[in-house]
Image: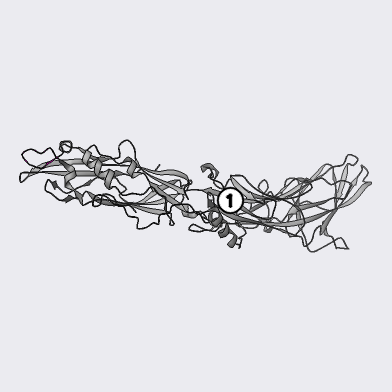
Amino acid sequence: MRKYFIKNVRYSYPDTNKIHSAPTILASFFLLMMHTNVVYSADSLTRDIGAVRPTCNDISFITSLNNDDDNGDGQADNRRKITAGVEDNLRQFIFSHKAASKVYVAQPVLADSSNGTSSEKRVRAYSDDQQTPFEFNKEYSLPLTLYLEGTHESKTLNDFGIRYEYRGESSEVICSRTVLGTVINLTVGFDAPKGQGTDFNSYNKMLITASGTANAKIHPSGSAQIEGWRYDGTATIHKPLMSISRITAGTSITPLDMLDGHMLRFHIQQGNQGIEAYFPVNITAPMHAATVKGWIDGKPVISNWINTKKGHFTLFKKEIQYTLLDQFKQPITKSAWAGRMVQIRENIAHVIQSFLPRVQNWINTSLNWSPEWINKPKGTFTDTIEARDIFKDILLDHSTINGSRSFHPSLLKKDGLLLELGENTHNWEASVNGVRPVIITQNQFSVRTEKIREKAGRQEIRFKSSYIVKTP
């Protein structure tokens, strides 16, 4: 990516395109609007919130279709026995009445069933341990707690019911009611265009300042009130009370200890009963760099012997390949980029120095570098470092004796310093369109005298170049 110290120093960027300004948010918005195929997330979960407390008045309830995978075994929960303490797609029923001591609970039936039985079931029922199947058509002492699990989606609102009777000590009926229920299939999804990265649903990640479309579907429609979207992390939710909403990430990343911990949630409500669907959204940015190959070991490069004749000399030619990582030390390409671009820049011109005035002047006047952000669409970059074809004159002491050419006295000793980064380091920074820049390397560099000799009446010198990669 960078060539330095070539013919009095020049840089080239063969694998990048420089940019002068970030793409506008408007451009990102139009890209988003063109991407309309929302994928419903396989990682989304749902849960029931709130309890039903049957009274002697007519009431209704909602419960979720339990087709998520709370225990992570790869199967929809409504297809097998649930796990107590883990399953949260259960609607709690609490039967209690101040004038009654008993309650009779009949078998659930479809609303259009005239004979009180039906082969088409909507729910399974459990006792208060959430494991033992609840027995209907029996009388129980109060208070009574049971749980309903939605196993089949309702076709219409309130399409099944459960009849119950509050009874006294002698089983006399105090009141008889039927609570009508709806099993709601709530599905949610999120689509952030992958851009140069990866489809969002592969890792539930997107870059800072990126946008995506959140979509919720409720069936049967109109079965509950939409309470809308919210996010546990930092993001702007456009039209949060709509089932389809645009979500724009802020500039804050998901903390390291919160991988899959910040949820995008969609909530519906009926009375005091809620159903919530949610899935993780991790906001990422390039925060680290990992060396892949190249001059990684920091082993010094020893130059050929350099004499005082007019001409040029060469020190080394090396390269280092890096992969950009997010805060979780995973490749940044595992995030959806959604119209954003990962970029890098360096500080070399501000830190490289020499105590030799002619060398420092050469650096100041000949170093060709750019402070601009450089696009990295592959999430990788190669730092090619060359020091060759350098004029020998900059090494010489120009207060010559008897017309002879001699190296500068500071170089005529072991470890004499030619170039270094001083107290600073060669830093590469990374960002997303210039936002939230972070230092990803703190590399060290020096060129020192390795050995001096005389040959055929001339001084000769050999240099040792060291470049040490440090990735915080």
Task: Tell me residue 96's x, y (percent).
Answer: 84, 42
Residue 315 percent location from the top left of the image: 21, 48
Point out the image quarter for the N terminus: bottom left
> Observer-nearest residue: 356 or 185?
356
- All told, the count of numbered labels is 1
| Magenta residue check for 405 | yes
Q: Residue at x 30, y 46 (%)?
A: 297
- For the residue pair 167 and 463, the one nearer the viewer reads as 463
The kind of secondary structure element at disc 1 is strand
Locate residue 17 relative to residue 244 in the image: left or right: left
Q: Which residue is mark 1?
A: 248
Coloured how?
one colour
The verdict on residue 372 being magenta is no
Dominant secondary structure of the residues highlighted in magenta in the image: loop
Q: Is residue 147 visible?
A: yes
Quadrant where the C terminus lies? top left
Instruction: Identify the residue at horizontal 39%, vertical 56% (top origin).
Output: 16
Position of residue 119 relative to residue 446, above or below, is below
Give, as a three-letter code, the residue at label 1: Thr
**Crowding near pointer 1: few (<14 within 10 Å), some, many (20+)?**
many
**What is the x, y in percent for residue 455?**
7, 45
Q: Is residue 106 visible?
A: no
Give x and y (percent) for residue 265.
65, 49
Picture quarter containing residue 94?
Answer: top right
Choose between 285 and 178: the one closer to the eye.
Answer: 285
| 29 relative to 326 in the view: left or right | right
Give the magenta-colored segment's residue range: 398-407
Above or below, 449 against 1 in this view is above
